Image (tube, rainbow, N blue to C red):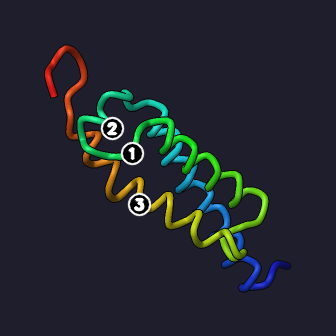
Amino acid sequence: MASFDGLINLVVYYGTLALTVWAFVDAVIRPAAAFVAAGKLTKPGWLAITGIATLILLWQGPLSFLGLPAVIAGVVYLVDVRPAVRGLRRGNTSW
């Protein structure tokens, strides 16, 4: 039978991993021009940040030395960049 601490560690691990995967997938599906129009870092920059954050969490977990910055990178994308990029319309509109 698993301990309570082990269960909490699994929930934190998979929760933070899901958060950074969500941030990476969202960055993939957004148009590159929207990042520039919103005044944010470019799409390749955010793809690199969220992709590396996902790999760090996958290999080391959120409780490692680099785990906390990886979680923060995913949260910053989802809280700051995603709403700004998502608020812009797709198509032939001028930004």
**Which residue, given by chain and number where applicable, does mark 3 sit on?**
76
Q: Would you identify the image quadrant in which residue 87 lies? A: top left
Q: How far is the residue under mark 1 from the one under mark 3?
A: 12 Å
Q: Residue at x 64, y 50 (%)?
A: 52
Q: Would you identify the image quadrant in which residue 78 lies? A: bottom left
Q: Nearer the viewer, mark 2 or mark 3?
A: 2
Please tell me which of labels 2 and 1 falls first in the chain: 2
Relative to 93, residue 59 above or below: below
**Which residue, given by chain and number where applicable, does mark 1 sit on?**
41
Relative to 56, residue 31 above or below: above
Q: Are marks 2 and 1 in contact (CB under 8 Å)?
A: yes
Q: Residue at x 72, y 85 (%)?
A: 4
Count of marks overlaid on the render: 3
Q: How far is the residue under mark 2 from the one under mark 1?
A: 6 Å
**Which residue, given by chain and number where applicable, does mark 2 sit on?**
35
Q: Amino acid at mark 1?
A: Leu
